[in-house]
Amino acid sequence: MSATAVEVLGIDAGGTMTDTFFVRTDGEFVVGKSQSNPDNEALAIVESAHDALALWNLGVEEVFADLVTSVYSGTAMLNRVVQRKGLRVGLIVNRGMEDFHRMGRGIQCYLGYSLEDRLHLNTHRYDAPLVPADCTVGVTERVDGQGDVVIPLREAEVYAAVDKLIKKKVEAIAICLLHAHKNGGHERRVAQICREVLHQRGVDIPVFASTDYYPTRKESHRSNTTIMEAYAAEPSRQTLRRIREQMLALGGKFDLRVMASHGGTISWRAKELARTLVSGPIGGVIGSKYLGEQLGYDNIACSDIGGTSFDMALITKGEFAIQKDPHMARLLVSLPLVAMDSVGAGAGSFVRIDPYSKSIRLGPDSAGYRVGVCWAASGIDTVTVTDCHVILGYLNPDNFLGGQIKLDVERARAAVKEQVADPLGLTVENAAAGVIELLDQSLRGHLRSMINAKGYNPIDFVCFSYGGAGPVHTYGYTQGLGFKDVVIPAWAAGFSAFGCASAEFEYRYDKSVDIAVAPGAGDAVKLASCVTLEQAWRELRDKVIEEFRINGFEAADISLKPGFSMQYLGQLNDLEIDSPLPSVASAADWERLVEAFDDTYARVYASAARSPELGFGITGAIMRGIVGVKKPQVPHEEFSGQIPPAAAVTGSRPFYRGGVWKEAKLYSMEALRAGNRVVGPAVIESPATTLVVPDGWVTELDNHRLFHLREV
Ligand code: AMP
Ligand code: MG
């Protein structure tokens, strides 16, 4: 294969844009964009691929045949759950617990709310349950918290339950019994009976027992996750299959992987597809970690603005944090998720005037791929943030998606005048500038509190800013926070897709365990603890190997990374630790685990906070398996001078900020060279992103095509 063969494709099918990221064998890459197409994602991907490959003068057919690997991330599965467009699921639970899923946890009725709305009970809202009451059946049995059977399973009730669900015409069955993570015997027996009855009745539908999928404590989380698997995984697999078929039709024979919530990628054929429920915004965090590793940035504040949201994450000492019991689509789930904070504010957010307070409100809903009033064909009549950008000269109306979409400044002005400026008694430009300032201020507040709340200070962090609209607002949301450096990759618009392309092929499985070693415990207890942990690892290892086998890998190809969650006994939270040993079998091994935990604890909190006198507990076993894949290379260029080449200067445009119109110099991002320095007011344009350098700011492009932005 030649050095210029195209090998890797990363895809980010977001709510607004569908980005593709192609990497050649020599590490060179191109980014493509198209408008997302919620009805046919495959079409948007192909369109985006055309856009990217045109930069290399290549056709899609020429390239697809050579591709070795492709990673997809997107919002389709999450949307399916949010819009309740999944399968009709039947649920078998303990008798007496039939309403458990429907009632949900209290917190689920205000998830995603702003603080002021959380406080008011009358704003709380329960979403429709994934499984309706009449498709839920209880059966008698009980396993206690220790995993001991206290009431045997009444099998006759299970037979009746399956018959009832068949009559209800369910399309999948989920089984969630109390404490099944400690002892899955009853659940497996229920599953067996389900399959037996389904077979007899000639009904071919899948059966999901929580113990086989998500053997973790917390019944609500475990049942939500298992139900989601039954509800949304298969339909999503169909979407992925269609994408794959489209790629096959274009000559692509590679396997398709999907970004999973834990930050690794898994096959579209993977057994547990609910793990890919949240994949879109994770790409950027993985990309930041990868870029940080290559260039020596350890502490990174990741920030991504697209059309619909602002997503933030922290990488500390080269690692992102994992959230154990996150929520997705307003449901608590037991899936490991790359810890992120999201705010429903982006460049497509709607702008409205609160009729009571006469203040400007942004979002939380947005125009998505329909941009705003400025795009005449959008059908949108409510002002969006993008309309304000266009009015103020931030965005070039003839360069949206490289000019594929023409924006109409006058339409935007008329809408802002009527909906925002006139009601507030402002000029059109002051109203638009107010919206931008408000957005900047709110994002800045969120970024600051995310960092402070975790006990850090921005001075120790480099802020990475990306997403199509990230660079438009970088100055605004970083101003005054005091970051060590602010970095904008020239490929910001496709950064999440870049992250997908740089992610590992990695399965991760978790299992809850209850291990407690009290202070002063003897070697026998430590040894027994190792045996319990080892047993859980073995189970998880088998699952990892089984998944990779679907893709034709053997155990020997996989590098296995066992881990565990440990806490000082009595603590509420635990820390995830990579095991220093591949397996554990003695009291001395136990001490090694404890040491690894103690070290991490001192790093995350403080040495003085260590409390070994409390004893140690392990709450969960983790197994990750990784197979090597091709990754992009960070660009490397020779430095040229500070003065941008003449070809990079494309003209000037009136730009409004701080109450005055000034002429901003315009540059072409692609034509700028390493070492070039651009002093504001200036706007650096690219086909899918725009870097705004206001008055009093300056940016320099380094030799890795990263812009560094600062106030002078
Ligand atoms: P994303 O969802 O990350 O692709 O970001 C989309 C956003 O990028 C849009 O809503 C625009 O506000 C912003 N953007 C900045 N410059 C451009 C451009 N030249 N073309 C398209 N979108 C752009
Ligand atoms: Mg994006």
Image: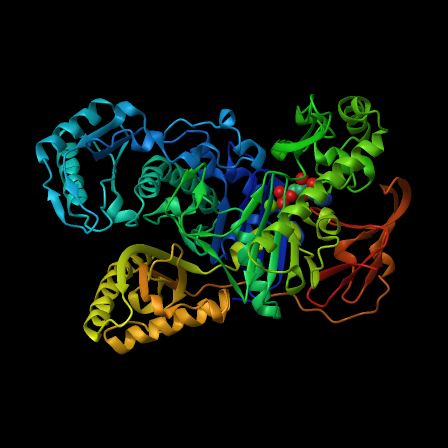
The residue drawn where x is 26% and y is 57% is 514
Quarter where residue 186 is shown = top left
User: Is 510 left or right of 471, judged from the image as shown?
Assistant: left
Extreme-bottom residue of the structure:
588
Please state the horizontal and vertical placement of residue 536, each as a whole percent of the image. 25, 60
Quarter placement of the C terminus: bottom right
Which sits in the foreground, 441 or 11?
441
User: Is 587 left or right of 406, judged from the image as shown?
Assistant: left
The residue drawn where x is 69% and y is 21% is 355
Please state the horizontal and vertical placement of residue 16, each as a whole percent of the image. 60, 38
User: Is 200 left or right of 132, judged from the image as shown?
Assistant: left
Give above or below for 106 relative to 638. above
Ligand 1 is located in which of the four quadrants? top right
The answer to whether residue 584 is visible is yes
User: Is 498 left or right of 260, judged from the image as shown?
Assistant: right
Give above or below for 177 relative to 20. above
Quarter where residue 679 is shown = bottom right
